[in-house]
Image: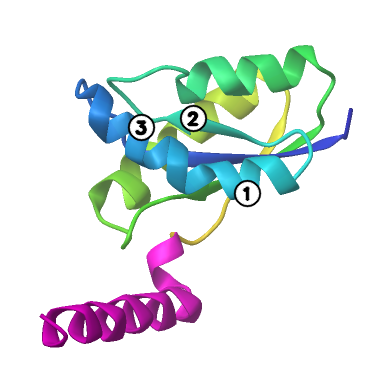
Amino acid sequence: MSDHRVLLLAHGSSDLQWCRTFEKLAAPSLASVPDSAIAYMELSEPSLDDEIARAAQDGVARVTVLPLFLAAGRHLRKDVPAMLDRLASEHRVEISLASPVGEHPLLGDAIRHIVEETLTQTSSH
């Protein structure tokens, strides 16, 4: 068990298909990063609250929350930091909030690759 855990944070939805999409997206990271997990801000399980509590119970000292969001809107500027402050205080765990994945330049490259692939597929029909 590591003293540092990474949580991949998704918004959450009552639509199970939506959740499966994010679970598939997170699967390669969860498989390659030991002791990482996915958590949802609201409407889905496991919740961010549950995953921070589990980390504290496991003796984890530091948690990095990596948002699976395209941009930092109100949730990432206000709601999530307030949640993390409360959870850090409640569970005595150091929690840092990383930038959303949408701000990483590699995501733009991945989107370009998908667009090029889509154009190739549609032009061959």
Q: Residue at x 41, y 72 (%)?
A: 103
Q: Residue at x 29, y 44 (%)?
A: 75
Q: Residue 20 carries which label?
A: 3
90 over 17 or under it: above or below: above
Three-letter amino acid code at the position of disc 1: Ser
Q: Which mark is residue 78?
A: none
**What is the number of callouts on the image?**
3
* Residue 40 seen in the current view: yes
95 or 110: nearer the eye? 110
Determine whether, in the image, residue 20 is placed left or right of residue 122. right
The region drawn magenta spans 101-125
Can you tell which quarter of the image residue 2 is in?
A: top right
Which residue is tagged 2?
39
Which residue is tagged 1?
29
Mark in the foreground, 3 or 2: 3
Determine whether, in the image, residue 40 is placed left or right of residue 34. left
Three-letter amino acid code at the position of disc 3: Arg
Give SS at disc 2: strand
Give the quarter of the figure containing the N terminus. Answer: top right
Give the quarter of the figure containing the C terminus. Answer: bottom left
- Residue 87, image x and y in percent? 56, 24
74 or 112: nearer the eye? 112
- Dominant SS of magenta comes to helix
Q: Which of marks 1 and 2 is nearer the N terminus?
A: 1
Q: Do the residues labelled 3 and 2 touch (CB within 8 Å)?
A: no
